[in-house]
Image (cartoon, grey):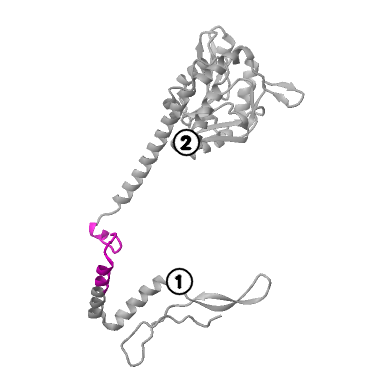
Amino acid sequence: MSEEVTMTLIVPTRQRTAQLGGLLDSVAATTAHAESLEIILVVDADDPASMSFRHEALPIKHVVVQPGQTMGVLNSEGYEASTGEYIMLLNDDVLVRTRGWDERVRACFDDFPDGIVLVHVNDTLIREHLCTFPIVSRTFCELAGGICPRSYIRYRIDDHIEDVFNLLGVLGVQRTVYLRDVVFEHLNSVAHPEADRVYMSDPNILAVDAPMFDALFDERKELALRLIDYIDQRARLVASASRRQRLACIIDPFSLRVPGRQRVKCSAWAWWITILQRGRACIRQRGYRGLVQAAGRRVARLLPSPVRSSPTLSSSGNVHLAKQARPLQVVRAKGASPLLRGCRRGDRA
């Protein structure tokens, strides 16, 4: 029986079906629950090969757009067509190396039931230094008004999403999870004499996207505040439901009238009067012996537990005396009414 779609991979692609096939083969080979996965290919209307691409092991949905759209538009169109609860932005030049990666991602979202969390994987190039291939919840996208701004040409989309969660961290809410051992190998790299393989940006496109990223900083701050409000609201709802459940279990209002339910405040004089009244009542009901026993129990609660010595074996093998608790004892004074003379503590060390 097929499962409900829980995760969507959005993959913009153009005229690279061989590379796309490699990506989807690796996804099919490593996904634990492929039946709950949704692959959305965002393709140009003049790219018939990509429009007709299918995969025998994975469900494919095509979103056709006019050629020449920005990456922000491509990702946004893919999001609009998605149905998964969790959405990942992905490229077609990637190979998934970690089996069960989808279970690891879902476990991260399970840790945050409100859905406000950013998960990202190890792309083998930028790694933990910057979120690459972000995974967010539909709840986040709805609060943000979409998966990303449509105005970004190619770069700074990952930066934009991560920056929102960095701002949450400033507000004391850390919701970014980096899965170091979940590897999505990014093949778009060039050799570097000092750093092995590195990712290189097109400086002309970056010259447009970088100022756009800076211009949207205030917008990201406002989004972070909305997310905080949502997190707090969800927490209040959960707490309210828990309290309601506790009260629903109470069926007898008289069972609530227990000692200690009130905060009693009075002057020292009134306190002594209360003690005398309670003492007289105790004598009438249980006599002087009951009064002494009640006073002994009260003192026992106020004092630290008395101890006595008993031999134990230390870690070095030597026998020494260890202290053990011994109950308080109430004794009668000769020739007088019962008194609380104190507690016997056993042999002193």
Residue 183 appears in view: no
The residue located at (36%, 73%) in the rendering is 298
Q: Which residue is mark 2?
A: 171
Q: Position of residue 294 (x, y in %)?
A: 32, 76
Q: Which residues are magenta?
A: 253-275
The residue located at (50%, 82%) in the rendering is 346
Q: Position of residue 323 (x, y in %)?
A: 54, 75
Q: Which residue is mark 1?
A: 304
Placement of 63 over or under 29, stated as above or below = above
The residue located at (52%, 31%) in the rendering is 166
Q: Is 197 situated left or right of 169 in this image?
A: right
Quadrant of the rendered image containing residue 193: top right
Q: Earlier in the sequence, mark 1 or mark 2?
A: 2
Quadrant in the picture for the C terminus: bottom right
Q: Amino acid at mark 2?
A: Leu
Mark 1 and mark 2: Cα distance apart in space: 44 Å
Is 255 part of what is drawn in magenta? yes
Q: Amino acid at mark 1?
A: Pro
**Mark 1, secondary structure of its residue:** loop
Placement of 193 over or under 305, stated as above or below = above
Which residue is most to the top? 46
Label 2 crowd bin: few (<14), some (14–19), many (20+), radius 10 Å: few
Q: Is 190 situated left or right of 91 in this image?
A: right
Tag of residue 197: none
Q: Position of residue 315 (x, y in %)?
A: 66, 69
Placement of 105 over or under 262, stated as above or below = above
Label 1 crowd bin: few (<14), some (14–19), many (20+), radius 10 Å: few
